[in-house]
Image (cartoon, helix red, strand yellow):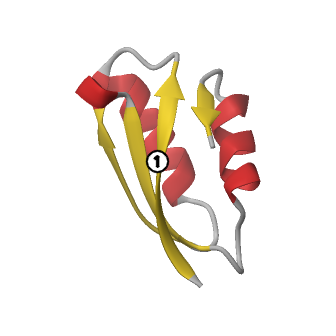
Amino acid sequence: MRRLNYFMLKGARTEEDYRKVKNAIEELDGVFKVDYEMAAEVVGVDYDDETISKEQIKAVVDSLGYTLIV
């Protein structure tokens, strides 16, 4: 089922940090769209939860050195 979830992102401080996270998530199978709001430290992910889980998205972001709170 298609879902839109907002996750807190910790450790990202610059526009480049957020773009790196956005690009990494967008490359995952099952992800339709990724947006972010730096001021709120939030990343919005539109994805198919039958293809990819929140935990898989978190693992990719965490591997970049940031913390995604699911």
Query: Whole-percent x and y of residue 47?
Result: 53, 70
- In the image, 35: left or right of 60? left
On the image, the x and y values in percent for residue 54 come to: 67, 55
Residue at image position (39%, 37%) is 42
Q: Which residue is mark 1?
A: 23
Relative placement, left or right, of 51 versus 45 is right
Q: Quadrant for the C terminus, please.
A: top right
Question: 32 or 70: which is nearer to us?
Answer: 70
Q: Nearer the viewer, residue 15 or 50?
A: 50
Q: Residue at x 75, y 41 (%)?
A: 59
Q: Residue 3 at x, y = what percent? A: 51, 72
**Vertical comparison of 44 with 18: above or below:** below
Quadrant location of the N terminus in the rendered image: bottom right
Q: Residue at x 64, y 28 (%)?
A: 64
Query: Given the image, on which type of amino acid does mark 1 rest?
Result: Asn
Please identify the residue farthest to the bottom as the structure is shown.
Answer: 1
Q: Is 50 situated above or below 19?
A: below
Q: Residues within 10 Å of mark 1 (few under 14, many from 20)?
A: few
Describe residue 26's horizontal placement relative to residue 61 as left or right: left
